[in-house]
Image (tube, helix red, strand yellow):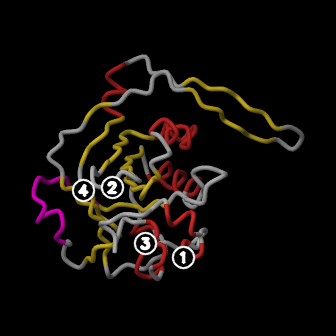
Amino acid sequence: MFSVRVHSVDAGHPLSFEDLEFSQVYTSPHTTNTINTKKSQSNPNTAVSKYSERRGVTHLFRSIAHSSLPNPSSKSTTIFVIAVPNYFSFEDFIRFCGSRIDHITELVFIRNDGMDDRYSVIIRLMNQVTSDGFYCSLNGKKFSPGEAEVCHILFLHSVDYTESAEIAGTPPDGSAELPTCPVCLERLDSDTSGILSTLCDHSFQCHCTSKWTDLSCQ
């Protein structure tokens, strides 16, 4: 099981996507159709409570005792999307979620001022069925057809926000800290990282790797 601690002195900033439009594409045995859908919310308070942006440093931890394979005991209704590339805007991410955005009760974009090439997303879903569906539909999917980066999703046991850098960086009992850099995380053994497959071998994709250059990552 994974957990996240965020070192943040930011209270979070509400976001609204009331006028966001996206296309849902579906196929039938005979045709392919595209429907333009406008996501609107009649109650502005719903938008305020559902989406927000927060500044902070994210620390990812994993229980040493758990297997890398997702199982009922390691699942939850809170998920963590690691290292979304910065060229993918918040609006792009909402479109990427498609119709499953309706199953989300809270979505927080976490930005680290020291890492302007990526951001992370913490998502709470209605129940385990919708959480599993979100994972199965989007985990391992490319953010953009023309790019190499894929969506990595982890089930979270807990999310904590703290103003203490020491507390945020201290692993919970029985846990070890993992990198949030996608290149580093994908190069780890799956038993350590909890990621089952690597769709982009970053070590051989110079163009891909160059986009994740980060002085804080060794």
Please state the extent of the stretch shown in magenta in the rendering: 158-170
Q: Is residue 62 left or right of residue 38?
A: left
Give the CA distance from mark 3 to mark 4. 17 Å
Q: Which residue is mark 2?
A: 115
Give the CA distance from mark 1 to mark 4. 26 Å
Residue sitting farthest toward the top: 42
Residue at screen point 26% across, 63% down: 59
Give the CA distance from mark 2 to mark 4. 9 Å
Residue at screen point 33% across, 55% down: 115
Earlier-in-chain disc, 3 versus 2: 2
Q: Which mark is residue 203?
A: 1
Earlier-in-chain disc, 1 versus 4: 4
Count of marks overlaid on the render = 4
Foreground mark, 1 or 4, reads 1
Give the CA distance from mark 1 to mark 3. 12 Å
Say if the magenta span includes residue 159. yes
Residue 180 in percent (x, y) is at: 36, 65
* Element type where label 4 sits in the image: strand
Q: Which residue is mark 3?
A: 185
Residue sitting farthest toward the right: 30
Say if the magenta span includes residue 126. no
- Quadrant (top left, top right, bottom left, bottom right) of the N terminus: bottom left
Quarter occupied by residue 82: bottom left
Residue 169 in percent (x, y) is at: 18, 67
Quarter occupied by residue 215: bottom left
Q: Which residue is mark 4?
A: 57
Earlier-in-chain disc, 1 versus 3: 3
